[in-house]
Amino acid sequence: MVQITMQVTERLAQQLQPISDWLPTILELSLIRFKTPAVQTASEIMDFLASSPTPADLLNYHVSDRAQERLQRLLAVNQAGLTSPEEQAELDEISQIEHIMVMLKAQAHEQTSKKN
């Protein structure tokens, strides 16, 4: 793990403090450079992480019905072999988002297991 130090304004530091545990994930989601409707799903997740969820909240988190329905449609189109390049890019982005969420949930599970 690499530590990065940066200077921010006092105001920004106050805004970042409550979400400091989630900053690496929020930055990673931001760097994916979303170019498709997957950005809506990423925004949902970033809003959730910005709420300072507990590990239990994270384990119970699911994206919106809209996001899940969009993913199901994309998977059906992909399975039929009819995916456009734009839809494939969206599927790739959703895959990256899912990977990040799986890692976060695994981390949350580990934290909750240690407490029990």
Image: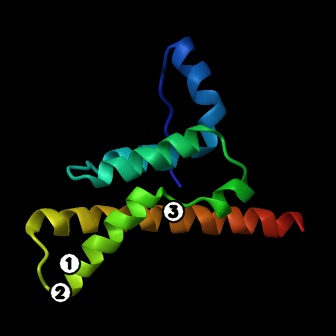
Above or below, 74 against 31 in this view is below
Residue placed most toward the observer, 87 or 26: 87
What is the total number of numbered labels drawn onto the structure image?
3
**What residue type is disc 1 on?**
Val
Provide residue 107's location: percent of width, then percent of height. Answer: 65, 64
Compute the Cα span from label 3 to label 1. 24 Å
Say whether residue 45 is left or right of residue 71.
Answer: right
Name the mark nearer the viewer: 3 or 2. 2
Q: Disc 1 vs disc 2: Cβ atoms closer than 8 Å? A: yes
Specify the farthest residue to the right.
Answer: 116
Q: Earlier in the sequence, mark 3 or mark 1?
A: 1
Colouring method of the image: rainbow
Say whether residue 85 is left or right of residue 93.
Answer: left
Specify the farthest residue to the bottom.
Answer: 80
In the image, what residue occupies the spot 61% across and 36% down?
19
The residue carrying mark 1 is 77
